Image: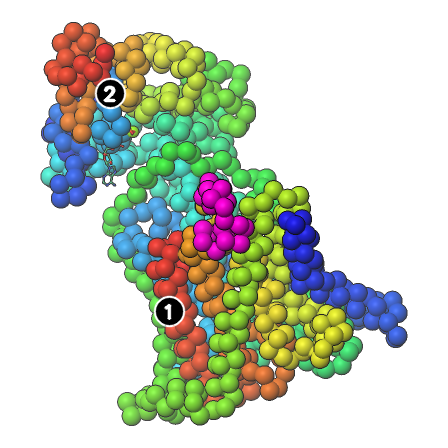
């Protein structure tokens, strides 16, 4: 019985998480006339100058973003965990908030602020001072979100680290900077490298910012190039997109492998049994300057762009700054009067609910088997589910198109451009997250409870219902909301999986911004709503789990 | 080497939460003093206040002739300037440096010339019986050997005082016995001032010149092991030292 369940689970995961990629691979390889073996797609991709430039651009941007993120994230993490920086916990959650906001919102904000002709900052400064449509604009916007990866990983590893390593150096006579260089930095190097590679991967896989900022500046990255190919509409376009996405997938896999190797090989044992309370370094006369610096940074990455979006959302006429120009009518128009945006909102909301619910149910079921049974092959579940999670969204979308465009294994209508396809994509993408979160929850529950229930005669199902579900509420709630949140504003996969007539919040914002620069603030209104949703959801998750989940 | 003097030390965490209070004591030059008491009585806190890793909220602390902490007059000498050696319970031997580099680090910070560093490090490694293991990385050492690295690192800069916080609690019984005699022997031969934190009365009895019995952040009794044994001030001390 149990074995059948496991077999079925593995089968489901193979269909959802492996088969699409296989299909992608086979379709691209057998793309010759009549389905014969052909490397034309690969050839045309690998010999095209445009593509090589896109690959080069991707490497450059990703490297620059990783470096900049480290430059900002490491000192911030150190400041917040090792010194007597005031309100450090509050500052930490503010500084980490961009982690949960989709970066294309930043692109919209910075276009509004630093568009070379109409940008707010340029008008205040009097001339075309800033131009967002540049390589540095692209790097800046990506970094202003992705530095949070570094901040989170490095901060976590600093908190885990036994503080007596640093105290021993202090007593040896070393000052704070020397200690940081000689002791702290070498000890956290693995997590810096790990976090840096994650940022690299996230940049290479990102779509929104490169499309909104890069493309107008004629800086094409791999993801935007895949998008262009796919939107050509022809089969050869799809194959080329497929070939290129295999390239992206391959690089992502290599990056992840390197990251795992680094984490496994060079991890020092820096965690001691006894938790120590660290002696904080007193900033002294550096306190005020560092607070000012951090506040200025927060202003630059968060408050300034957000106010930009806010002003734009509240302006009757874009680009005018008088009191009688302020209005809430944009909100009303977007939500209730414009069909497209209203529909987009409704679609995204219901997709969020459906995908989060199904992913959580399936995830909770699968991770139960993985954590609480001793069946052989149970660890395969985690491995299979994590495949789409660590694959760039663009590649996942393309694989799903090729696998399920002709219905579900030839049964039923085409799934392309349907809500069903979107729900499927979100579930496939976030299943691994649901599994990991619920697995952590299961691990904290003692087996004894389970056994006690069974001894008293309750079956497997009733044990699950009466013992596990109540105890699993916190991780389940967290997983649900943490899937719901990104799904509502998802863009990377959605833009490839949908066409005209099926809008979501992400695609509508994208199209409003891309095709109509003077959109009357509609994109900004939606962006504000997304940010508000993120803040609200984060608050709910944090409160409902007593700070265990959320930022 | 020099004496350590506490004058009315208190460590306050909240309105009426005192980790240590009314702590007055002079530890003489070359003396081996143990802080003994149940868990949570403030031993570690007091030790860390000597090092400057924790700030006392009231009272004065002297190291030798120098005032190092006087919160009433807003004076505080940071740990990196105090010149004390410390051996942590977790050893805190830096895992990315080999034995030699670990022990040499305090001297490098003081910009001691290279050949003198080498001389002093090798000498110190001989004292703690680690000669020949200079190139080993910490993960190739046993717990007891890491302990000795930590000891050598604490001693190499010839500190004013050596602080040890339950250094033997992670070792097995046999090794603990050997380390007890070894630490005491090193202290005697180098004429070190040592403050030793423990909750094990055998350790305190066999190693110390004087024992400070603490409870709830206060000193109950100070005296040589013999004095305390023959003349405990109250039942708590008698029970604890028996
Ligand atoms: N940040 C803090 N806030 C409030 N009380 C604290 C704080 N840090 C320590 N304490 C309290 O100070 C007291 C002394 O702690 P200390 O670590 O010095 O005890 P100890 O004698 O070393 O105990 P052990 O033998 O367990 O190591 C404890 O009661 C502890 O709860
Ligand atoms: Mg202690």
> Residue under circle 2?
B36
Query: Is A395 in the magenta?
Result: no
Could you say where residue A286 lies in the image, as x and y percent from the top left? 28, 51
Q: Which residue lies furthest to the front in this view?
A: A457
Classify mark 2: helix, strand or loop.
Answer: strand
| Disc 2: CA contacts within 10 A as few (<14), some (14-19) or many (>=20) | many
What residue is rendered at 70% in x and 62% in y? Answer: A15
Classify mark 1: helix, strand or loop.
Answer: helix
Left or right of A43 on screen, residue A176: left
Could you say where residue A165 lies in the image, as x and y percent from the top left? 40, 35
Toward the viewer: A174 or B33? B33
Q: In this view, does A243 lie above or below A433?
A: below
> Residue under circle 1?
A536
Q: In this view, does A266 lie above or below B110?
A: below
What residue is rendered at 45% in x and 32% in y? Answer: B94
Query: Is A456 in the magenta?
Result: yes
Q: The magenta stretch spans which residues?
A: A448-468
Toward the viewer: B125 or B140? B140
Q: Is residue A512 above or below residue B10?
A: below
Q: Does the residue labelled 1 lie within 8 Å of ligand 1?
A: no
> Quadrant location of residue A163?
top left
Q: Say whether mark 1 and mark 2 are on the same chain.
A: no
Q: Mark 1 lies on which chain?
A: A
Could you tell me if residue B6 is visible in this image?
Answer: no
* Ligand 2 visible in quadrant: top left
What residue is rendered at 75% in x and 66% in y? Answer: A23
> Quadrant location of residue A298?
bottom left
What residue is rendered at 72% in x and 62% in y? Answer: A19
């Amino acid at each position: 019985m149990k074995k059948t369940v496991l077999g079925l689970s593995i089968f489901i995961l193979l269909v959802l998480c492996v088969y699409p990629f296989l299909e992608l691979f086979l379709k691209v390889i057998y793309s010759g006339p009549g389905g014969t073996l052909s490397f034309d797609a690969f050839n045309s991709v690998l010999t095209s100058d445009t593509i090589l430039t896109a690959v080069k651009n991707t490497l450059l941007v990703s490297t620059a973003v990783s470096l900049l993120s480290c430059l900002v994230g490491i000192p911030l993490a150190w400041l917040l965990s090792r010194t007597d920086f005031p309100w450090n916990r509050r500052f930490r959650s503010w500084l980490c908030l961009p982690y949960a906001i989709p970066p294309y919102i930043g692109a919209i904000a910075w276009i509004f602020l630093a568009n070379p002709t109409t940008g707010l900052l340029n008008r205040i400064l009097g001339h075309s001072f800033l131009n967002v449509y540049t390589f540095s604009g692209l790097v800046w916007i990506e970094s202003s979100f992705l530095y949070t990866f570094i901040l989170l990983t490095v901060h976590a590893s600093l908190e885990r680290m036994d503080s007596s390593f640093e105290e021993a150096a202090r007593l040896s006579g070393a000052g704070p900077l020397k200690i940081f260089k000689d002791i702290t930095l070498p000890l956290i190097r693995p997590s810096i490298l790990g976090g840096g590679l994650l940022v690299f991967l996230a940049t290479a896989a990102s779509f929104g910012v490169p499309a909104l900022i890069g493309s107008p500046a004629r800086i094409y990255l791999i993801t935007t190039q895949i998008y262009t190919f796919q939107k050509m509409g022809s089969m050869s376009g799809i194959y080329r997109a497929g070939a290129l996405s295999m390239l992206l997938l391959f690089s992502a896999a290599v990056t992840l492998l390197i990251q795992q190797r680094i984490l496994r090989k060079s991890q020092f044992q820096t965690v001691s049994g006894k938790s120590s309370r660290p002696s904080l370094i007193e900033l002294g006369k550096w306190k005020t300057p560092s607070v000012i610096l951090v506040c200025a940074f927060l202003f630059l990455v968060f408050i300034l762009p957000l106010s930009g979006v806010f002003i734009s959302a509240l302006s009757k006429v874009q680009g005018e700054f008088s009191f009688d120009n302020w209005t809430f009518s944009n909100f009303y128009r977007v939500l209730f009067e414009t069909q497209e945006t209203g529909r987009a909102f409704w679609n995204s909301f219901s997709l969020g609910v459906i995908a989060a619910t199904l992913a959580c149910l399936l995830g909770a079921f699968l991770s139960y088997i993985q954590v609480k049974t001793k069946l052989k092959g149970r660890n395969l579940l985690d491995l299979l589910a994590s495949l789409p999670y660590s694959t760039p969204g663009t590649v996942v979308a393309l694989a799903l198109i090729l696998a399920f465009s002709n219905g579900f294994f030839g049964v039923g209508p085409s799934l392309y451009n349907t809500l069903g396809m979107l729900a499927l994509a979100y579930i496939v993408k976030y299943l691994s997250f649901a599994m990991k979160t619920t697995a952590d929850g299961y691990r904290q529950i003692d087996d004894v409870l389970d056994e006690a229930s069974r001894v008293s005669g309750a079956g497997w199902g009733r044990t699950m219902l009466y013992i596990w579900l109540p105890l699993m509420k916190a991780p389940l709630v967290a997983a649900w909301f943490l899937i719901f949140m990104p799904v509502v504003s998802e863009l990377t996969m959605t833009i490839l999986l949908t066409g005209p007539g099926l809008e979501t919040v992400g695609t509508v914002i994208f199209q409003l911004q891309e095709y109509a620069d003077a959109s009357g603030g509609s994109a900004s209104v939606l962006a504000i709503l997304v940010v508000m949703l993120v803040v609200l959801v984060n608050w709910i998750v944090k409160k409902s789990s007593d700070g265990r989940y959320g930022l | 080497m020099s004496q350590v003097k506490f004058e009315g030390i208190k460590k306050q965490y909240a309105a009426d939460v005192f980790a240590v209070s009314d702590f007055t004591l002079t530890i003489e030059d070359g003396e081996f003093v143990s802080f003994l008491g149940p868990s949570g009585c403030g031993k570690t806190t007091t030790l860390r206040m000597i090092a400057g890793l924790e700030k006392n909220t009231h009272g004065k602390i002297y190291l030798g002739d120098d005032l190092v902490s006087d919160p009433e007059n807003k004076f505080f000498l940071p740990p990196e300037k105090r010149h004390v050696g410390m051996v942590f319970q977790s050893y805190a031997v830096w895992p990315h440096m080999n034995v030699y580099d670990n022990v040499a680090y305090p001297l490098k910070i003081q910009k001691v010339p290279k050949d003198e560093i080498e001389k002093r490090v090798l000498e110190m490694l001989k004292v703690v019986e680690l000669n020949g293991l200079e190139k080993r990385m910490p993960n190739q050492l046993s717990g007891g050997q890491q302990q000795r690295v930590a000891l050598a690192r604490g001693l190499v800069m010839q500190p004013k005082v050596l602080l040890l916080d339950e250094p033997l609690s992670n070792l097995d019984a046999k090794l603990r016995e050997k380390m007890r005699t070894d630490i005491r022997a090193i202290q005697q031969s180098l004429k070190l001032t040592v403050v030793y934190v423990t909750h094990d009365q055998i350790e305190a009895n066999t190693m110390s010149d004087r024992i400070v019995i603490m409870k709830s952040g206060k000193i109950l009794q100070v005296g040589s092991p013999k004095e305390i044994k023959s003349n405990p001030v109250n039942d708590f001390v008698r029970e604890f030292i028996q």
